[in-house]
């Protein structure tokens, strides 16, 4: 029984038109003052619902069907709506995921803080302002005196999240629910925010419920943890114990799926098969003659470039400048240099990992290579031949087929209005890789087989698939063009870890089978470690370090690389 | 079959929500009745109001058949020229819907293609289209329609103008409505063109026309459909308003607007039915179209639910 | 701030230039000005002399710049129909339209905004639903039908209010006003209601949807999670944020009001600019049409400029962004 918070048998249900949906079922939790308790799970685990239930803000039409929430031993379920609202802020507060949207854009920081403070305590304006100022300083806002009269949009993402934390704290609550507080932030800022939360828990004895999908974050700062799946509690206990020696099968599988920063594995093992088994007719539906071996043969049949000695892709002194000027302005503005002086070689059959935080220019690099963005200077060579810029690259240029891309967001990378058959068939049709419709069908079905999807998937639309399945389809679409060079731009960052492990395994298998050269872009160092032979680190549009992957992760040379590596939350402390 | 329907009823959002909204169902029925009445007017109308031989000035001002002076030949009475009001309304609705639908179609084709191209290509082209749209916006719909009408009166000889009046009316109303489609199409295209499936198509080197028509257009049809429905109501309303002002359809052609205009002249002398029935038909038609538009908007934008 | 306003001003000038070009083309090429000005019996030579006098043989651009110059100096030319100076004709009728439009806008805002807020906050209430259905009907009834109905009810059946004309007005300089006499005010009621009801429903639905959008944002959820008083959440946080887009649309609405005043003026025989325009269309009085066009666009552009400046006051993101300078 936690002396601060205890949740017993909590069940939340949502009536939907498909029947009653149980979002969380018989959840038990307890928390002491100053304790940080993590709620971890993949999407649909119900972790945010628990947070909402504790603070009494379950989205309509959901309701608590069973169980109780006790704060300091007092039941909250029996409270009237008014009494509950008085409790919010005063005793329980909340931090949201995206600092960009959680502050009122039309009010200054001072306005918002003073209003919150005076809402809960009977102090004068100047007294409240003084308290707010002290808090902003405590949460690490420099120049708080002058900055508190600014508006939210004048703060950077990390600073804004500090303001959000100060706002959540300014009424001295006993419990703060932090829902993915660092997910929208870069690792370096994430580290600072997590340190701040840790410090506040210790000095102010505030209890935190930290909701996250990131096991690294859990390992980094929580004292105890609850692992959830599909609304049910899988395992709970001290963090070191749960993550170090997991007892439940799910926790074990989850831990196995987390990419490790300290060593490269050939493959992820012990992967959860959480896709429900499809009914047999689904699996039995086949296009005649289609199979994964046919796909392999077909893909290998493509004409190969006569063995070229040098790099597949070679980038020299590449520079990309974005013009900030408006459409009708006549003066040329300075523009913003997204990439400066980039030199990069990708060798055949190798995977080059590109690491960078948001705004580092890593996606711009990908876009410059595929011709979506026009570089302002430099050369690119593909298989030893110069690669024209942007729109100069004709629609029938060979590189349009030989360079393919897998995108980050599987929900936006497939056209929702077209059948999978048409989506995967488009490159075959466009590049004239099949003689007739029947052959195209056979290829599509076979490639689906190759990416471990049922062939019948070709008859459906994208919205009928999960994120992981969509990403498999996206990989299939890239593959049927018979590319030699594949660019993967954050291909797994929108996916749950167990799905991420599946997709990474798939990419590894395909890379081995077809000898693809890959440019693998990610902000996640552990993922890059698992995939890459070579590594390049981008910072503010400049390449700060390149080299062999193993050497890089053992002993990075550049100060920024060292910083990045040290700031990435690691399981090393626990998973010894 | 029944089992299939039961599944569709739950899984298809549109049908599911439709079956739970009695107001929308009533609106759909009213709209359907109006459309059917208009389509089948030549078959079901007792007389043909365009046929001068079919009515007689002696029959004018008969009140509805259920009143004391009513005549069973004329269910809801006759107008000042002795035309059967029911037939006039059926034919009038036919005309209103014809002008409404064709002007919305005109506006939709013009606005959508300009909007998609502006959103997709951006830059100068976008700026020019949007500035034109700004100018168009500063001339409200009714003003544009009046102007086009006035201009054509100036350009064409009188007889030719009367012949082409319906075309002029359609173009006038269509021109005043294209901006809605253009802005919606452009805004949606902006969102879509940054999505990765469009980039995937661009990387392959697909022709921009194919990207716009095959990839983008189907994905932005939803909001355009909402605009189309709401604008249909606006177009019918505009047609009626212009006809009421005497600059729409020719004065002797029965449209809901002209019927109401004629009716207002007799409202003070007690012949209420001449104005009430056309006005009611018009209002019910527009309300039902508006309710359907509202329904589509709610379905497509779950936040509003 | 100044750069921002200057940029908007530039855009407005562009719109005005485009509209004046349109008006010029209308004026110059729709029908033959000379043929309309002179009688049938005038000889070809006389017509040709007149043509030369009027400068109609000059290059198009010269004619356009002259047209523009005349507009800027307030010389609007003469009506084909009445032979009066158009400037005077429009000026004498402008107060009637502007007063009518102003009162209608007031009605639309005073009733529409609170009703919008109410229906946004009480999403499922019986009254909110009733209001919503009423507004849907309101949007669907053509202005002229509303006018006829009001005339029938209050004018014919009850006999309470006048049904046509402006009634007694008071002249202040060239401006004539309805606001200073009881008769004038009574005459204003029905037309203003007719014009206001449609706009009212638009305002209400707009405020409602904006407010609902804002109520779904994270910062409102965060404010609730901090225990901020619901009244402050609704009015201090949500309402202010929803006003940003509402202000823009109200600017557009005034244009709509001016346009629909044509209909209202026709129903109530209200002697405003709209009625004049309608007459000029029926009699193909091209110069009046083109000047009316320019003046409407000017009113519209000025109002939008004011809206932009209001935007600036309300939204710090516009005010404090580096772009705004």
Image (cartoon, grey):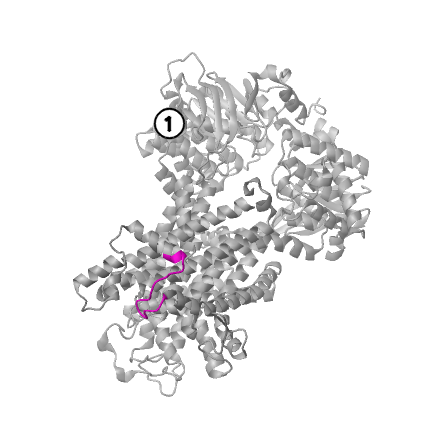
In the rendered image, the quadrant that contains the C terminus of chain C is top right
Picture coordinates of residue A31, whole percent (x, y):
78, 40
Would you say B55 lies left or right of A490 here? left
Q: Nearer the viewer, residue B37 or B201?
A: B201
Q: Nearer the viewer, residue B71 or C190?
A: C190
Would you say C198 lies left or right of A537 here? left
Quadrant hosting residue A209: top right
In percent of the image, x 27 and y 75: which residue is there? B47
Q: Nearer the viewer, residue C40 or B196?
A: C40
Would you say B54 lies left or right of A186 here? left
Picture coordinates of residue C85, whole percent (x, y):
36, 66
Determine the residue located farthest toward the top in the rendered image.
A309
Q: Main secondary structure of the magenta part?
A: loop
In percent of the image, x 57 and y 49: which residue is there? C312
Would you say B156 lies left or right of C110 here? left
Determine the residue located farthest toward the bottom in the rendered image.
B68
Residue beneath disc 1: A393
Quadrant hosting residue B52: bottom left
Give the magenta range.
Answer: C70-85
Q: Where is C175 relative to A386, above or below?
A: below
Count of picture labels:
1
Q: Where is A332 relative to C291, above or below?
A: above
Secondary structure state at the residue bearing disc 1: loop
């Amino acid at each position: 029984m936690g002396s601060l918070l205890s949740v017993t048998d909590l069940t939340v249900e949502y009536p939907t038109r498909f029947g009653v949906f149980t979002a969380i079922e018989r959840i038990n939790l307890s928390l002491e003052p100053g304790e940080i308790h993590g709620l971890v799970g993949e999407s649909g685990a119900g972790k945010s619902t628990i947070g909402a239930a504790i603070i009494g803000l379950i989205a309509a039409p959901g309701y608590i069907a069973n169980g109780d929430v006790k704060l300091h031993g007092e039941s909250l379920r029996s409270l009237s709506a008014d009494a509950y609202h008085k409790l919010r802020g005063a005793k329980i507060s909340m931090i949201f995921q995206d600092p960009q949207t959680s502050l009122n854009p039309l009010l200054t920081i001072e306005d918002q803080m003073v209003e919150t403070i005076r809402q809960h305590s009977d102090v004068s304006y100047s007294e409240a302002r003084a308290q707010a100022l002290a808090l902003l300083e405590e949460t690490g806002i420099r120049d708080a005196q002058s900055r508190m009269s600014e508006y939210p949009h004048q703060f950077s993402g990390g600073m804004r999240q500090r303001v959000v934390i100060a706002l959540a704290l300014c009424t001295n609550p006993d419990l703060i629910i932090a829902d993915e507080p660092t997910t929208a932030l870069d690792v370096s800022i994430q580290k600072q925010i997590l340190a701040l939360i840790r410090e506040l828990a210790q000095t102010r004895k505030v209890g935190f419920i930290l909701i996250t999908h990131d096991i690294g974050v859990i390992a980094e700062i929580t004292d105890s943890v609850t692992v959830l799946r599909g609304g049910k509690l899988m395992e709970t206990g001290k963090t070191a114990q749960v993550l170090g020696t997991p007892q439940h099968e799910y926790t074990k599988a989850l831990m196995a799926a987390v990419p490790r920063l300290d060593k490269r594995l050939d493959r992820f093992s012990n992967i959860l098969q959480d896709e429900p088994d499809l009914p047999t007719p689904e699996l039995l539906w086949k296009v005649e003659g289609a199979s994964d071996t046919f796909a392999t043969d077909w893909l290998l049949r493509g004409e190969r470039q006569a063995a070229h000695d040098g790099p597949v892709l070679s980038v020299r002194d590449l520079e990309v400048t974005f013009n900030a000027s408006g459409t009708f302005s006549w003066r040329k503005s300075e523009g913003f240099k997204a990439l400066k002086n980039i030199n990069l070689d990708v060798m055949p059959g190798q995977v080059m990992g590109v690491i960078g935080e948001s705004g580092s220019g890593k996606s711009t690099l990908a876009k410059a290579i595929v011709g979506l963005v026009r570089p302002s200077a430099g050369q690119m060579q593909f298989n030893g031949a110069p690669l024209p810029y942007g729109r100069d690259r004709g629609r029938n240029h060979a590189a349009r087929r030989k360079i393919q891309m897998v995108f980050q967001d599987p929900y936006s990378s497939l056209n929702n209005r077209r059948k999978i058959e048409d989506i995967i068939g488009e490159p075959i049709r466009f590049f004239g890789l099949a003689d007739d419709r029947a052959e195209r069908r056979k290829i599509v079905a076979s490639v689906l087989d190759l990416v471990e999807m049922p062939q019948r998937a070709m008859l459906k639309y994208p919205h009928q698939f999960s994120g992981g399945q969509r990403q498999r389809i996206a990989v299939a679409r890239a593959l049927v063009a018979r590319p030699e060079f594949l660019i993967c731009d954050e291909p797994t960052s929108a996916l749950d870890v167990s799905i991420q492990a599946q997709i990474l395994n798939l990419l590894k298998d395909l890379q081995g089978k077809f000898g693809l050269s890959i440019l693998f872009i990610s902000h996640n160092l552990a993922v890059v470690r698992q995939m890459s032979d070579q590594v390049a680190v981008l910072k503010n549009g400049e390449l700060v370090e390149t080299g062999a992957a193993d050497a890089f992760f053992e002993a990075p040379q550049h100060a920024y690389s060292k910083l990045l590596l040290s700031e990435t939350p690691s399981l090393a402390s626990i998973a010894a | 079959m029944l089992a299939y329907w039961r599944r569709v009823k739950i899984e298809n959002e549109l049908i599911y929500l439709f079956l739970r909204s009695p107001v929308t169902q009533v609106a759909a029925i009213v709209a359907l009745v109006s459309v059917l009445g208009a389509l089948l007017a030549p078959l079901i109308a007792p007389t043909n109001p365009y046929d001068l031989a079919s009515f007689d000035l002696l029959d004018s001002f008969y009140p509805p058949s259920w009143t004391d002076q009513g005549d069973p030949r004329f269910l809801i009475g006759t107008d000042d020229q002795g035309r059967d009001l029911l037939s006039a309304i059926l034919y009038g609705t036919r005309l209103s819907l014809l002008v409404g639908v064709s002007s919305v179609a005109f506006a939709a084709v013009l606005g959508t293609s300009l909007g998609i191209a502006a959103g997709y290509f951006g830059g100068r082209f976008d700026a020019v289209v949007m500035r034109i749209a700004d100018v168009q916006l500063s001339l409200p719909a009714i003003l544009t329609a009046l102007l086009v009408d006035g201009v054509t009166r100036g350009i064409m000889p009188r007889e030719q103008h009367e012949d082409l009046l319906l075309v002029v009316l359609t173009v006038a109303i269509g021109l005043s409505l294209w901006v809605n489609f253009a802005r919606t199409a452009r805004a949606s295209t902006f969102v879509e063109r940054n999505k990765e499936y469009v980039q995937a198509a661009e990387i392959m080197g697909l022709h921009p026309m194919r990207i716009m028509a095959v990839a983008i257009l189907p994905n932005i049809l939803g909001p355009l459909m909402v605009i189309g429905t709401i604008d249909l109501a606006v177009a019918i309303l505009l047609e009626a308003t212009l006809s009421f002002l005497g600059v729409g359809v020719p004065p002797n052609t029965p449209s809901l607007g002209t019927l109401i205009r004629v009716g207002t002249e007799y409202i003070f002398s007690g012949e209420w039915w001449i104005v009430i029935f056309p006005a009611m038909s018009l209002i019910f038609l527009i309300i039902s179209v508006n309710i359907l538009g509202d329904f589509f908007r709610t379905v497509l934008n779950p936040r509003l639910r | 701030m100044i750069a921002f306003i200057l940029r908007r001003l530039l855009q407005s000038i562009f719109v005005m230039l485009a509209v004046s070009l349109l008006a010029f083309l209308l004026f110059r090429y729709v029908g033959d000005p000379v043929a309309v000005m002179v009688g049938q019996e005038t000889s070809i030579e006389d017509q040709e002399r007149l043509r030369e006098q009027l400068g109609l043989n000059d290059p198009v651009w010269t004619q356009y710049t002259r047209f523009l110059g005349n507009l800027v100096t307030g010389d609007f030319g003469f009506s084909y129909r009445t032979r009066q100076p158009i400037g005077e004709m429009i000026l004498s009728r402008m107060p009637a339209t502007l007063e009518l439009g102003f009162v209608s806008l007031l009605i639309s805002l005073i009733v529409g905004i609170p009703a919008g807020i109410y229906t946004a906050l009480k999403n499922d209430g019986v009254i909110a639903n009733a209001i919503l259905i009423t507004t849907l009907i309101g949007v669907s009834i053509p202005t002229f039908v509303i006018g006829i109905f009001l005339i029938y009810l209050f004018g014919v059946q009850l006999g309470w209010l006048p049904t046509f004309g402006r009634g007694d007005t008071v002249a202040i300089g060239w401006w004539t006003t309805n606001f200073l006499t009881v008769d004038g005010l009574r005459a204003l009621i029905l037309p203003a209601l007719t014009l206001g009801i449609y706009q009212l429903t638009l305002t209400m639905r707009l405020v409602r949807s904006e407010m609902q959008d804002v109520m779904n944002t994270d910062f409102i959820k965060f404010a609730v999670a901090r225990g901020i008083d619901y009244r402050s959440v609704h009015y201090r946080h949500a309402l202010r944020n929803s006003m940003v887009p509402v202000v823009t649309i109200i600017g557009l609405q005034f244009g709509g009001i001016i346009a629909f005043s044509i209909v209202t003026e026709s129903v109530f025989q209200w002697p405003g600019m709209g009625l004049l325009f309608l007459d000029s269309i029926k009699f193909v009085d091209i110069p009046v049409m083109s000047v009316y066009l320019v003046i409407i666009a000017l009113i519209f552009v000025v109002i939008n400029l004011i809206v932009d400046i209001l935007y600036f006051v309300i939204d710090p993101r516009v005010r404090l962004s580096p772009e705004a300078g």
